[in-house]
Amino acid sequence: MKQTKNGILLNLKVSPNASKNEIVLTDDGVKVRITAQPVDGKANKALVEFLSKELKIPKTSIDVVKGNTNKEKTLLFKVFDEEKVKFIKEKFSL
């Protein structure tokens, strides 16, 4: 996780076709399990919707900046409010 002038960058791994949507912190980093299938961008859309609800930020504040067709992704959270930044960092702290 890295804070930039554009927001917070987070590298994570996505597991589609999961039994439920959840965030899992592992020794290797952050893993997000998504119930959607990795077809036609459905998993990416579901990922953004899930994280938007979990982090209580608008979907438009989350961009997949790297790994659109890969399980390894880099997301940009465009948040600048100190409380939201702190909340996101705590949610994904290892």
Image (tube, helix red, strand yellow):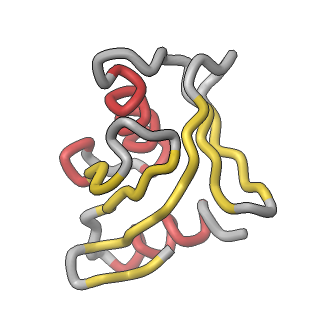
Check the image and report above or below for 48 versus 11. Answer: above
Check the image and report above or below for 8 versus 36. Answer: below
User: Looking at the image, which residue sits at the far front?
Assistant: 70
* Residue at image location 71% in from the left, 46% down from the top: 24
* Residue at image location 51% in from the left, 49% down from the top: 72
Q: Position of residue 59 (x, y in %)?
A: 26, 42
Q: Position of residue 43 (x, y in %)?
A: 42, 26
Check the image and report above or below for 17 versus 75. Answer: above
* Residue at image location 72% in from the left, 69% down from the top: 94
Quarter of the image for residue 91 reads: bottom right
Closer to the camera in the image, 28 or 59: 28
Q: How many marks?
A: 0
Q: Position of residue 15 (x, y in %)?
A: 60, 32
In the picture, measured across the screen, residue 27 lies left or right of residue 80, that is: right
Closer to the camera in the image, 3 or 52: 3
In the picture, measured across the screen, residue 81 lies left or right of residue 29, that is: left
Q: Position of residue 2 (x, y in %)?
A: 44, 79
